[in-house]
Amino acid sequence: MRRWLLPALLLSALIGAWQLAASTGVLADVLGLESFLVPSPAEIGESLWENRSLLAENAWVTLREILFGLGCALLGGVGFAVLMHLSGTVRDASYPLIVASQTIPIVVISPILLVWLGFGIGPKIVVVALICFFPITVNVLDGLRSTDLDAVKLMRSLDASRWQVFCRVEAPTALPSFFTGAKIAVVLAPIGAVFGEWVGSSSGLGHLILTDNGQLEVAREFAAVVVLSRRWPWS
C-alpha cells in the first residue's frame, strides 16, 4: 500500500497545485504567457473527452507503427544475437559495428528514410525497429554467453547435439536477458514512432502534437501527450 499510496498522494498534490496555479493565472504570469497557453488539468481532461475520436484515430496509427517496428526489432534482434552467439566470426566482425552505430542519432536517419520510403508507415516502422534493435540484440547475446559452461559440458557428455544444447540450456538461460531487452525496447518504441512522425507524416499522435503546436491548441497538445504517456497494452 505504501508503494502505491505515497506516489498517488504526491501526484494528486502536484495536479492540485497545477490546477490552482493555472486557473488563477499565477502560472501564466510566472511563465510570462497568455492564460490560454497554460491549460489547467481540468481543461486537458475536457480536451481528452471532446477530442476522444481524433485522439483515438491518431493513437491507432502510432500504435500500429510501434507494433510493427517492435515486432521487426524482436525478430531481427533475437535472430542476429543467436547468429553472433553461434558464430564467433560473425560476432567479432559485427558486434563493434553494432555498438558504434549507436553514436548516430536516430533523428538524423529519419529524414533519409523519409526521402527513400515516403510519408507512409514504412519510415516510422524502420525508425522504431532501429531504435529497439540494439537493446534486444545486446541483452540476448549477453544472456546466451552467460550460460553455465558446466551445464553445456554435461549436455555434451550425454551426446546432445548443438541444437539440443541451444534449446535446452542456452535459450532458457537467455530468457531473463531477453525480457530485459524487450522491456527497454517497449519504452523506446513510442519515442521512435514520434520521432518518425515529427520528420514527416499525415497522421499519428506525433503529427497531431506538431499540428496543435502550430495552431496553439495547447490543451489538445497536452491531451495527446497524456495518451502517449499511458502504459501501452503490452507493457
Image (cartoon, grey):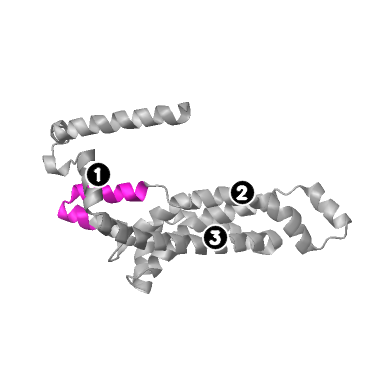
Secondary structure at numbered mark 3 = helix
Quarter holding residue 112: bottom left
Secondary structure at numbered mark 2 = helix
- Residue 22 is left or right of residue 141, and the answer is left
Few, some or many C-alpha atoms within 10 Å of disc 1 (few <14, some 14-19, many ≥20)? some
**Residue kind at label 1, given as amino acid type:** Gly
Q: Position of residue 2 (x, y in %)?
A: 46, 26
Q: Is residue 227 found inside the magenta-colored segment of the image?
A: yes
At 69% across and 55% down in the image, what residue appears? Answer: 171
What type of secondary structure mainly makes up the magenta span?
helix
First reached walking from the N terminus: tag 2 or tag 3 = 3
Magenta region: 211-229
Residue at numbered disc 3:
74
At 28% across and 56% down in the image, what residue appears? Answer: 55
- Residue 120 is left or right of residue 156, and the answer is left
Few, some or many C-alpha atoms within 10 Å of disc 3 (few <14, some 14-19, many ≥20)? many
For the residues marked 2 and 3, what is the alpha-carbon distance in whole angstroms? 13 Å
Tag of residue 45: 1
Q: Position of residue 104 (x, y in %)?
A: 44, 57
Front one among 44 and 170: 44
**Residue kind at label 2, given as amino acid type:** Ser
Residue at numbered disc 2:
177
